[in-house]
Image (cartoon, rainbow, N blue to C red):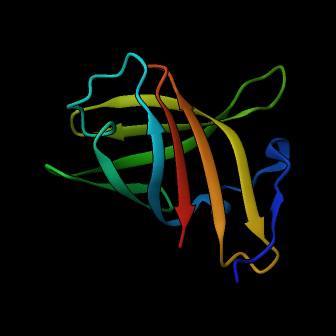
Amino acid sequence: MAELLFDVNLQQLPDEFLNGNWRVADRVLNHTDPTSMLACAELFALQPGRVEVQASHGQDAGRWQIQRDELLNRPYLELMLGQEKTRALVTRLRRSRNGAESQLNLYFQSGMEMHLTQP
């Protein structure tokens, strides 16, 4: 049986809640190039300051960080990969009480929406 998941207050989101291996469960590309690394991503491995992306046609590595807008303190995930640099608004994070299961929703600058899950 799946754990009960709770919404995390995004204005107080600790960076470490994003660490770990995230599997892409669903995505909507909108205007995103369907051949780009992020559009084809299957797995994101986020460690402090470092990201590895595995896609159907290869992998890429780079850096990531959380940035926040000044007005509402909304968190943005900034990804700097070898081929791509982009930002994605964290629109929702849900976690189990013990942190073993999580769901993360991202909205990228390109209009792509992505739903990630852990484990």
Q: In the image, residue 45 lies at what x, y percent?
A: 41, 62
Judging depth in this view, the residue of 70 and 98 nearest the camera is 98
Which of the two residues, 35 or 10, is positioned nearer the viewer here?
35
In the image, farthest residue toward the front: 1
Residue at the image position 35 percent from the left and 22 percent from the top: 32
Say whether residue 108 is left or right of residue 5: left
Q: Residue 40, position in %: x, y?
A: 28, 42
State which quarter of the image contains the N terminus.
bottom right
Q: Please indicate whether residue 90 sits to the left or right of residue 60 in the image.
A: right
Residue drawn at 75 percent across, 77 percent down: 3
Q: How many numbered marks, from 0 up?
A: 0
Query: Residue at point 21% right, 34% down?
Result: 83
Residue 109: image location, x then y, percent = 49, 21
Position above or below: 71 against 26? above
Q: Name the image quarter holding residue 102.
A: bottom right
Which sits in the foreground, 35 or 69?
35
